Image: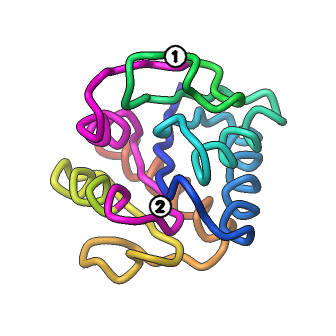
């Protein structure tokens, strides 16, 4: 199974949540599993989209209670590590997709870039050096497929 890390704000505008839901649908339709922080906002929306297509959703939670995961997380992983779980979120996927977000999202982008992961971003943080800016879910999916192809070619 190929895991895609999706990061973004715990609260977001409706247009961002709509994009996250659609991204979850598209990822699941292509057979990718979604890894995220497991809480609300972008995390809940991408999991909702993926779950609606029978996709695998993993939530790496900051606390120690699996029941704190959003209702669309199929596999909750409580860590009890607070925001330190951000590193686990991005290291779990072969690629990282950011949809807006705050400084927690920025920290995840930094961890992903330090680890050499391909990162794309829609909205906030799309101008960070090393991040590929995207404007649509179709562009995100193209980025994911290209990252997968590059990863397979390196093997």
Is 97 left, or right, of 131 in this rendering?
right
Position of residue 52 measured from the top left corner of the image (x, y, whole percent) = 83, 35
Is 17 left, or right, of 60 in this rendering?
right
> Circle 1 is placed at which residue position?
66
- Local SS, label 2: strand
Q: Which residue sits at x=51%, y=78%?
A: 123
Residue 155 in view here: no
Mark 2 closeness class: few <14, some 14–19, many ≥20 residues within 10 Å: many
Name the outermost residue toward the right. Answer: 52
Q: Which residue sits at x=61%, y=71%?
A: 139
Viewer-closest of 117 and 126: 126
> Circle 2 is placed at which residue position?
98
Position of residue 87 measured from the top left corner of the image (x, y, whole percent) = 26, 40
Q: Is residue 78 magenta?
A: yes
Mark found first going from the N terminus, 2 or 1? 1
Position of residue 69 measured from the top left corner of the image (x, y, whole percent) = 57, 27
Q: Nearer the viewer, mark 2 or mark 1?
A: 1
Which residues, given as a range, are shown in magenta?
A: 76-105
60 w.r.t. 108: above or below = above
Question: Dividing the image into 4 quarters, which one contains the C terminus?
Answer: top left
Location of residue 75 (image quadrant): top right
Residue 13 in view here: yes
Is 116 left, or right, of 8 in this rendering?
left
- Local SS, label 1: helix
Position of residue 15 measured from the top left corner of the image (x, y, whole percent) = 73, 72
Viewer-closest of 115 and 48: 48
Question: Dividing the image into 4 quarters, which one contains the N terminus?
Answer: top right
Query: How many numbered circles are shown?
Result: 2
Viewer-closest of 59 and 40: 40
């Amino acid at each position: 199974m190929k895991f895609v890390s999706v990061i973004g704000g715990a609260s977001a505008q409706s247009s961002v949540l709509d994009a996250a839901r659609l991204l979850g649908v598209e990822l699941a339709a292509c057979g990718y599993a979604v890894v995220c922080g497991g809480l609300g906002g972008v995390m809940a929306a991408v999991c909702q989209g993926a779950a609606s297509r029978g996709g695998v959703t993993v939530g790496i939670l900051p606390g120690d209670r699996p029941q704190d995961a959003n209702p669309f997380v199929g596999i909750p992983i409580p860590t009890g590590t607070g925001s330190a779980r951000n590193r686990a979120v991005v290291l779990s996927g072969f690629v990282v997709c950011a949809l807006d977000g705050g400084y927690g999202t920025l920290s995840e982008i930094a961890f992903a870039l330090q680890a050499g992961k391909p990162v794309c971003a829609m909205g906030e943080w799309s101008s960070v050096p090393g991040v590929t800016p995207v404007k649509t879910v179709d562009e995100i999916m193209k980025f994911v497929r290209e990252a997968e192809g590059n990863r397979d070619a390196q093997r």
